Amino acid sequence: MTQPLAAGLAVALISLAAILGPFLGLSPWIVTLIAGLGLGSLTLDAARFGGRGGHVLAEALPGGRARLRRIAIHEAGHLLVARQEEMAVRQVLVGSLACLRAGLNTSGSTELEPPAHAKLPAEELRRWSRVLQAGMVAEQLVYGQSVGGSDDRALLGRLWGLSGQDVDTAQREQRRARREVEAQLRASQQQLQSEADALLALAPRLGRPLVGEA
């Protein structure tokens, strides 16, 4: 949930409590307390968790492991294909808490060594197309659809645009790269699952320390 949406819901609930409170026999003090707690939690979320407190909490709840595993599958896809392409990976983060600790406002991240030049040759663009689409393809293979990857698509579009390639060529080459990655990950699904397990084991959650911090 985004910070503006959370704020809107809090205001709506406070307004509803103020209107219905007298009919429900609620004391004005209770309504005031609800308002204070709601606004206080939003302030804490913004200050401590950058507006991602809902995501951090959801990942800490009993069903949060399944949420984190999907993120781990996505990042494992990037990691496996990056290794295949011999592209350097700086770090892989799984979960909102891990990303917030690293100063990132997202739920998962695979940080790659950036290209040396903004304008890349065609073969280098194909390599980046395979690596950047690998997370979405991994999700598609395991879950039937991809819910992440908007940042990957945006970065891929910028790389092709900065390299002076026309839209038709970029889209054709990206579709080709996606088919190649799908074939590669389909043949390596056991490795994909094992890599996701390893990433998930390292993912911090509220109330669960990082490995080495206990």
Image (cartoon, helix red, strand yellow):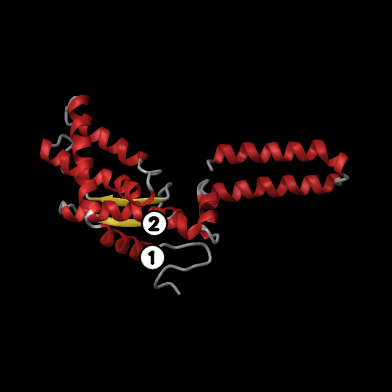
Task: Identify which residue is drawn at 16% across, 38% down.
Answer: 125
Q: Is residue 162 left or right of residue 38?
A: left
Please give the label number shown on residue 94. Answer: 2
**Viewer-side residue, 207 vs 190:** 190
| Residue 81: assigned label | none
Q: Quadrant of residue 192?
A: bottom left
Position of 172 relative to 92 (above/below): above
Give coordinates of residue 167: x percent, y percent: 22, 25
The residue positioned farthest toward the bottom in the image shown: 214
Secondary structure found at label 1: helix
Q: Residue at x 40, y 53 (%)?
A: 70
Neighbourhood count class around disc 1 (C-alpha, 10 Å): few under 14, some 14–19, many 20 upward: some
Q: Is residue 81 above or below residue 196?
A: above
Q: In the rendered view of the protein, which quadrant contains the N terminus?
A: top right
136 or 110, nearer to the observer = 136
> Residue 184, how many percent across, how many down?
20, 51
Q: Which mark is residue 202?
A: 1
Crowding at mark 2 (Cα within 10 Å: few <14, some 14-19, many 20+)? many
Relative image position of residue 204 (x, y in whole percent): 44, 63
| Gap in angstroms between the C-alphas marked 1 and 2 | 8 Å
Give whichever of discs 1 and 2 has the lower sequence position: 2
Q: Which residue does the image show at 83% across and 41% down from the upper left?
A: 21
**Of 108 and 172, the residue lying toward us:** 172
Q: Are marks 1 and 2 in contact (CB under 8 Å)?
A: yes
The quadrant of the image that shows the C terminus is bottom left
Q: Is residue 102 visible?
A: no
